[in-house]
Image (cartoon, rainbow, N blue to C red):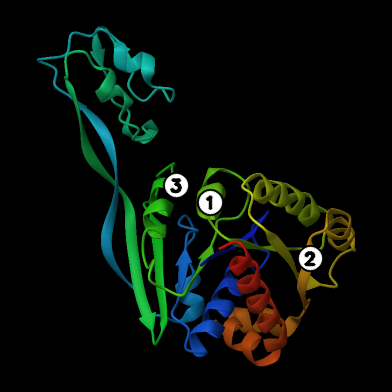
Amino acid sequence: MDIVITSGKGGTGKTMLSAAIASLMGDAGSAVCLMDCDVEAPNAALLLKIPVKPVDAATVPVPSVDTERCTGCGACEKICRYNAIPVIQGQPLVLPELCHGCGGCALACPEKAIHEVPREIGAIEEGERGTLHFVGGRLNIGEAMSPPLIREVKRRYYGSDTRIIDSPPGTSCPAVTAADGARYAVLVAEPTPFGLNDFILASQMLRALEIPLGAVINRDGCGDGGVDHYCLGQGIEVIAKIPQSWEIAAAYSRGEAVEHLLEHHRDALDTIAETALRGAARCS
């Protein structure tokens, strides 16, 4: 069962919670996999203290043009919605960073002058601790598109009892790609006006994807009650609240946030895990 843990904005504690829930399940003997799909800023393995190593390169297909066969007809340029292969003075110019790897240009070429070649965009990393497995992606510096790498991460560890997906924050293509197909979503909120605004956007995204969701309010007490009121009005269950705490912040700075949550906030973690598993099971 895929459970995605996501947030409308960065800095809500989403990755900390993902790592703590995965660790909780792993300690209980469940075959769980934490999938770090926040590939532009991967740090879940640091919180889990699991040694990881790169196991595969992630690639996307990009066009390569046979200039001897190309007639400069412009069919490739017309079909590309991302302007990744403009035709200049009768010659196609491939812009690989803009290419989405759809293969349309190769299909459209009447002369069969285009074939696809792989271009590396990042790496897949894996590690394990007992029954807890970890897989994550690390996007190469300067790459503009992370969804292909996120999809590659999600192809791993289908044999696990539960897969916890640590999503990128926000509501753009990376977050949609990470959440797509999940059976339940835990939406981590920050109880501030800014946090509420992005929480609303993220909840609307999950509902558009038809993913059942519940909310976790982190740093409870640092803001107003806007998130609570919104959830009440929209019928979104507030699963648990984790208080604003200097102790958690200090533990995080020492790299001990997961251990601190497991020791001092286990009841909240148990409630989140049980609610997410029940919600995912209802959608199976």
Q: Pointers 1 and 3 in contact (CB under 8 A)?
A: no
Local secondary structure at mark 3: helix
Q: Position of residue 122 (x, y in %)?
A: 33, 53
User: Picture quarter containing residue 99?
Assistant: top left
Q: Which residue is mark 2?
A: 237
> Farthest bottom residue?
263
Q: Position of residue 269 (x, y in %)?
A: 66, 81
Q: Marks 1 and 3, Cα distance to the nearest angstrom? A: 11 Å
Q: Pointers 2 and 3 in contact (CB under 8 A)?
A: no
Q: Position of residue 132 (x, y in %)?
A: 43, 81
Q: Which residue is mark 3?
A: 147
Local secondary structure at mark 1: loop
Q: Pointers 2 and 1 in contact (CB under 8 A)?
A: no
Identity, as a three-letter code, of the amino acid under mark 1? Asp
Q: Is residue 253 left or right of residue 102?
A: right
Examine the rendered structure and indicate whether residue 11 appears above or below residue 88. below
Identity, as a three-letter code, of the amino acid under mark 2? Glu
Residue 177 visible in the shown view: yes
Q: Which residue is mark 1?
A: 180
